[in-house]
Amino acid sequence: VRLVESGGGLVQPGGSLRLSCKASGFTFSRADMSWYRQAPGQQREWVARIRAVDNSTYYADSVKGRFTISRANGQNTVYLQMNFLKLEDTAVYYCKRIAHDLWGQGTQVTVSS
Protein backbone atom coordinates (compact mmCIF):
# COMPACT_ATOMS: atom_id res chain seq x y z
CA VAL A 1 0.00 0.00 0.00
CA ARG A 2 1.75 3.13 -1.18
CA LEU A 3 1.43 6.69 -2.47
CA VAL A 4 4.24 8.29 -4.49
CA GLU A 5 4.17 11.99 -5.36
CA SER A 6 6.07 13.61 -8.20
CA GLY A 7 6.12 16.81 -10.22
CA GLY A 8 7.45 19.31 -7.74
CA GLY A 9 10.16 21.82 -8.56
CA LEU A 10 11.21 25.44 -8.74
CA VAL A 11 8.89 27.88 -10.48
CA GLN A 12 8.59 31.65 -10.71
CA PRO A 13 5.61 33.51 -9.26
CA GLY A 14 2.69 33.30 -11.65
CA GLY A 15 3.89 30.00 -13.05
CA SER A 16 2.31 26.55 -13.06
CA LEU A 17 3.11 23.02 -11.96
CA ARG A 18 1.22 19.76 -12.04
CA LEU A 19 1.75 17.32 -9.21
CA SER A 20 0.99 13.62 -9.54
CA CYS A 21 0.35 10.99 -6.88
CA LYS A 22 0.51 7.36 -7.95
CA ALA A 23 -1.34 4.90 -5.74
CA SER A 24 -0.84 1.19 -5.34
CA GLY A 25 -2.02 -1.61 -3.07
CA PHE A 26 -5.65 -0.61 -2.71
CA THR A 27 -8.75 -0.01 -4.85
CA PHE A 28 -7.98 3.52 -5.96
CA SER A 29 -11.28 4.05 -7.78
CA ARG A 30 -13.12 3.77 -4.45
CA ALA A 31 -10.76 6.02 -2.49
CA ASP A 32 -11.40 9.64 -1.58
CA MET A 33 -8.11 11.50 -1.93
CA SER A 34 -6.63 14.74 -0.65
CA TRP A 35 -3.63 16.97 -1.13
CA TYR A 36 -1.98 18.67 1.83
CA ARG A 37 1.05 20.92 2.13
CA GLN A 38 3.52 21.90 4.80
CA ALA A 39 5.63 25.04 4.67
CA PRO A 40 8.81 25.38 6.74
CA GLY A 41 8.00 25.98 10.40
CA GLN A 42 4.27 25.61 9.85
CA GLN A 43 1.71 22.89 10.43
CA ARG A 44 0.53 20.70 7.61
CA GLU A 45 -2.59 22.15 6.00
CA TRP A 46 -5.27 20.69 3.81
CA VAL A 47 -5.33 21.95 0.20
CA ALA A 48 -7.92 20.01 -1.79
CA ARG A 49 -9.87 16.76 -1.95
CA ILE A 50 -11.77 14.72 -4.49
CA ARG A 51 -14.49 12.19 -3.82
CA ALA A 52 -14.49 8.79 -5.47
CA VAL A 53 -18.25 8.43 -5.79
CA ASP A 54 -18.85 11.46 -8.02
CA ASN A 55 -15.49 13.24 -8.49
CA SER A 56 -16.76 16.26 -6.57
CA THR A 57 -13.96 18.56 -5.48
CA TYR A 58 -13.30 20.88 -2.56
CA TYR A 59 -10.58 23.47 -1.99
CA ALA A 60 -9.02 25.55 0.73
CA ASP A 61 -9.81 29.23 0.32
CA SER A 62 -6.12 29.99 -0.18
CA VAL A 63 -5.99 27.99 -3.43
CA LYS A 64 -9.55 28.21 -4.74
CA GLY A 65 -9.62 29.37 -8.35
CA ARG A 66 -5.91 28.62 -8.85
CA PHE A 67 -5.54 24.89 -8.11
CA THR A 68 -7.46 21.98 -9.60
CA ILE A 69 -7.56 18.45 -8.21
CA SER A 70 -8.43 15.61 -10.57
CA ARG A 71 -8.02 11.86 -10.85
CA ALA A 72 -7.40 9.17 -13.45
CA ASN A 73 -8.69 5.91 -12.06
CA GLY A 74 -7.24 3.92 -14.93
CA GLN A 75 -3.78 5.12 -13.92
CA ASN A 76 -4.40 5.00 -10.14
CA THR A 77 -3.30 8.63 -10.03
CA VAL A 78 -4.54 11.85 -8.48
CA TYR A 79 -3.29 15.18 -9.79
CA LEU A 80 -2.98 18.73 -8.51
CA GLN A 81 -2.76 21.36 -11.23
CA MET A 82 -1.37 24.54 -9.70
CA ASN A 83 -1.66 27.81 -11.65
CA PHE A 84 -0.82 31.40 -10.78
CA LEU A 85 1.58 30.21 -8.12
CA LYS A 86 2.51 32.58 -5.32
CA LEU A 87 5.52 32.78 -3.03
CA GLU A 88 3.35 31.54 -0.18
CA ASP A 89 2.58 28.31 -2.06
CA THR A 90 6.13 27.15 -1.32
CA ALA A 91 5.84 23.92 0.67
CA VAL A 92 6.20 20.17 0.61
CA TYR A 93 3.05 18.77 -0.96
CA TYR A 94 1.63 15.43 0.15
CA CYS A 95 -1.20 13.28 -1.08
CA LYS A 96 -3.29 11.28 1.35
CA ARG A 97 -6.00 8.69 1.22
CA ILE A 98 -8.88 10.18 3.19
CA ALA A 99 -9.97 8.28 6.32
CA HIS A 100 -6.78 6.22 6.25
CA ASP A 101 -3.37 6.94 7.71
CA LEU A 102 -1.73 6.67 4.33
CA TRP A 103 0.54 9.47 3.10
CA GLY A 104 3.05 9.86 0.35
CA GLN A 105 6.63 10.96 0.95
CA GLY A 106 5.97 14.46 -0.37
CA THR A 107 7.27 16.57 -3.23
CA GLN A 108 8.88 19.99 -2.81
CA VAL A 109 7.35 23.00 -4.54
CA THR A 110 9.38 26.21 -4.42
CA VAL A 111 8.01 29.46 -5.80
CA SER A 112 10.74 32.03 -6.14
CA SER A 113 11.90 34.78 -8.46
Image (cartoon, rainbow, N blue to C red):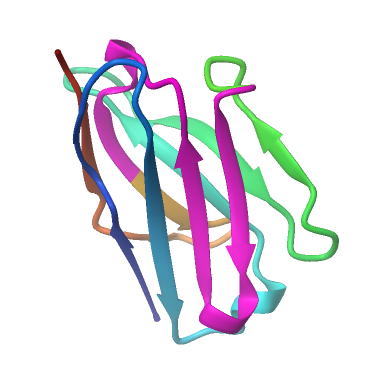
Identify which residue, 83 or 94, lies in the foreground: 83
Q: In the displayed structure, would residue 26 be above or below residue 91?
A: below
Task: Residue at 47% x, 55% y: name it.
Answer: 96
Figure quadrant of the N terminus: bottom left
> In the displayed structure, does residue 51 sit left or right of residue 76?
right
The residues colored magenta run 65-93
Residue at the spot x=66%, y=60% of the render? 32
Query: In the rendered image, which quarter is residue 55 located in?
Result: bottom right
Q: Nearer the viewer, residue 29 or 66?
A: 66
Residue most extreme to the right: 54
Q: Residue 14: horizontal and vertical position, in percent?
A: 36, 17
Q: Say if 7 sits above or below 63 in the image.
A: below
Number of marks in the rendered image? 0
The residue positioned 54% from the left and 22% from the top of the image is: 63
Residue 69 in the magenta stretch? The answer is yes
3, above or below 14, in the image: below
Residue 23 image position (x, y, % from top left): 44, 74
Q: Quadrant of the C terminus?
A: top left
Asked if residue 21 lies in the magenta stretch, the reply is no
Residue 66 found in image quarter: top right
Q: Residue at x 53, y 77 (%)?
A: 76
